Each structure stands twice: as C-alpha cells, then as structure tokens.
Image (spheres, rainbow, N blue to C red):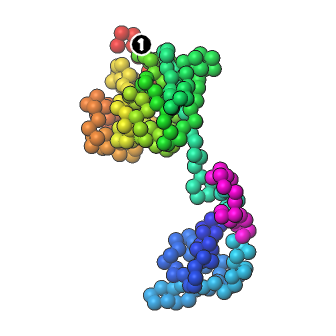
Amino acid sequence: MSRSLADALSRLLDAAGDVPASHFTARQKQALDALGRTTQALTTLPHGRGVVYRVTNRLQLENLLRTMRPGAADELPEGLPRRAVNVATHRDSKARDAGHEIHYLLLKAVGDPVCWRQGERVLELSPVTVAAGAGALAIQRDDGWQSNEPLWLVENQALFDRTDWLPDGTRASLAYYGGQIPARLHAWLAHCARAPEVILFADYDGVGLYNFARLLEHSPSPCSFWLMPGWRSLLTRYGSQAIWRDNHAAFMEASARLAELRASEQVLELCRAMSREGLALEQEAVWHVLPGV
C-alpha cells in the first residue's frame, strides 16, 4: 500500500490543481481516501459525474512523501546502479524498474577450440573450461559477442556439470540458465545471431516448450529443440503426471504457438505424445538412454 500511496501523492502534488479520481488506480484511490480520513490534508469533491482530489495541506503531504521517497531522482549522481536509485527514491531496491543491466552467462566448452569474440576481445573458452571448469560472459542486449560454434542451452545444472550425454563429436558452448530463460538472456539472443545454431535441451514440459517457442520466434540464429534418443520410451517409462499437471496451462500455450510457428514435425510429435500420455519428462532421463538406441 505504501508504494501505491507514494505514487498517488507524487501525481497529486505534481498536478497544477485538482486531479480526477479516474487518474488513479483502485489501490491508489484506496490509499488516498484512507490518508484523507486520517489527516485531512486532502479531500474529494464532486466534479461532473465523478470526483476530484484536492490538496488542502501541501506541506504535510510533501513531508509525508519525503519520508517515503527521501531522494529525488534529479538530485542523485549520474551513473548510479538502478537499484541504488530505487533505494534513494523509494526506500526499496526492487521498486519500479529493478532489473540489472548485465547478465552473466555461465558457459562451458565442449571440444576444442571453442571461443567467443567481440571485436578484438576474445574469450578462449576451451582452456578456461579446462583450467576453471567453466567461464562466463557479462552480456548486454546490444553487445557484439559471437561464436563460430553452436550454442547449447540447458536448464538443469546436472546437464551442465556432466557433458557425457552430448552426441559424440560435439564441439560447442554449453550454457546453463536454470528453469526459465531470463529476459536479459532472451533479449541478448534475439538481438543478433550469436552462434550458427542455438540448441535448446530443456525439460519436456510446458515451461521447456514455451522457452523454445520464444526462441524460435525471436532468435536470428537457427534454433532446434533437442530430442533424446529413444525419447518415446523414456517418456512412457519415466514421465511424470504431476509435472504434466503443474505445467499444463503453459504446455497448451506453447504447443499452440509451436504449431503456428511451424516447428519441426519431431517437436510437434513430442507435443502430441505428451498430450496423449498426460506425461512430462525431465532432462535427467537422458542418462537412462539404452545403449545402441
């Protein structure tokens, strides 16, 4: 409620005169009405078919707003992190636009050589992976980082820790993102072609398929959804009804979008099989693939 009140007071005090109630949200009007009853620093007056809010004690309201928002944005030093500005202006780092400008993409090289380039800057990912286990790129939406090798995306750490599930002879970057593809990573991938191919290996559920639909729709790089060898048998044997139920709404939206985007017949067949069986399948089933499948 305090954020709603602060937003409402800021709008009310910035106005040259009375402000129609229609200019405020329901929560903001509720906060203003409660404040008017307890302080008499503002009041409502009938106006046409509605009401307007009128300030009756500006100094009291300005002091109240200052306690909620101790710093004015135009008085702060330039270049402060966004969340530091929010602390000063709202006493809350997560107020308003709270996103970080940089996203750290955790990467592992599979094979050698694998590297990333941005102009004259080079990340030799293969030796970094050997020396430290993984590397990272500090990415921003419009930077120029690119690789000549495919980029694999996995959402569960076990698949990032052990890479023996990858097809023999793979030479690529393997990236871990955890659950949902973050908005900043998605925007980075959508800005320009980062790799000759982006391969998503996600859980076979509504979230995983929805992430693929977003990539397929927006990524300039060719995108594919990796299907485990023998996935039909794995789905039947190890699939989960509980995960299917929990992600059903996301699955319905994702499968419809994939059909509209003309996803590969193999991916559409996966959607049909999941719907037919009422099952979802987690990535870790990849280690149960039968030899020779």
Query: Does residue 26 sit above or below 285 in this rendering?
Result: below
Which residue: 51% across, 81% down?
20
Residue 223 occupies quadrant: top left
Q: Is residue 55 left or right of residue 270?
A: right
Q: Position of residue 54 (x, y in %)?
A: 60, 85
Query: Does residue 152 sit above or below 46 in this rendering?
Result: above
Quarter of the image with the N terminus is bottom right
Judging by the rendered image, the residue that carries numbered circle 1 is 168
| Label 1 element class | loop
Q: Residue placed farthest to the front in the image?
A: 120
Per the image, is 67 magenta? yes
Q: Is residue 288 left or right of residue 2?
A: left
Q: Position of residue 137 (x, y in %)?
A: 56, 32
Per the image, is 156 magenta? no
**Badge 1 density bin: few <14, some 14–19, many ≥20, Cα 10 Å:** few
Tell me where the magenta segment starts and ends, as one range. 66-84
Which residue: 46% across, 30% down?
146
Which residue: 50% across, 26% down?
116
Q: Is residue 240 visible?
A: no
